[in-house]
Amino acid sequence: MKIPVIRQFFQTTTPEQLEATLEVLEAFCEFRGVSETDVDVAGEMITNICGALEVHQLVKDGTPERDALNAFGQRVMGSIDR
């Protein structure tokens, strides 16, 4: 998870574009010939896209962008610490 990447995705793409990209990456990871390294890279992208989708939802619900990004980052870090 990289907050600057999530911010860039949030600012430059719509939720619909993110959803479509997410579907493609998930399908890519299921191909037989995909290497573990490729799956790791796609997994990182999937995490960032999911973060951007969550930030889109938080902003739609009225949270300022900066607070939405910070809240997402804190929630992820909190779940890792457990």
Image: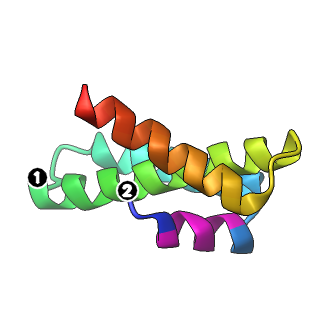
Query: As shown in the figure, which amino acid type bears the numbered disc 2?
Result: Met
Q: Please name the predominant secondary structure of the magenta segment in the image.
A: helix
Q: Residue at x 22, y 52 (%)?
A: 39
**Among the 4 quarters of the image, the one containing residue 12:** bottom right
Q: Residue at x 18, y 54 (%)?
A: 34
Disc 1: which residue: 36
Closer to us: 29 or 80 = 80
- Give the residues drawn in magenta, as a range: 4-10
Q: Quadrant of the N terminus?
A: bottom left
Q: Position of residue 81 (x, y in %)?
A: 25, 33
Closer to us: 25 or 4 = 4
Left/right placement of residue 51 relative to residue 39 reads right
Task: Give me the C-alpha separation between circle 1 and circle 2.
Answer: 18 Å
- Neighbourhood count class around disc 2 (C-alpha, 10 Å): few under 14, some 14–19, many 20 upward: some
Considering every residue shown, the one lying at the far top of the view is 82
Q: Does the stretch in magenta take in 54?
A: no
Disc number for residue 20: none
Q: Position of residue 66 (x, y in %)?
A: 69, 62
Left/right placement of residue 22 relative to residue 77 reads right
Q: Position of residue 35 (x, y in %)?
A: 11, 56
Disc number for residue 1: 2
Q: Residue at x 74, y 60 (%)?
A: 65
Q: Position of residue 27 (x, y in %)?
A: 41, 43
Left/right placement of residue 33 relative to residue 19 reads left
Element on which disc 1 rests: helix
Q: Does the stretch in magenta take in 9?
A: yes
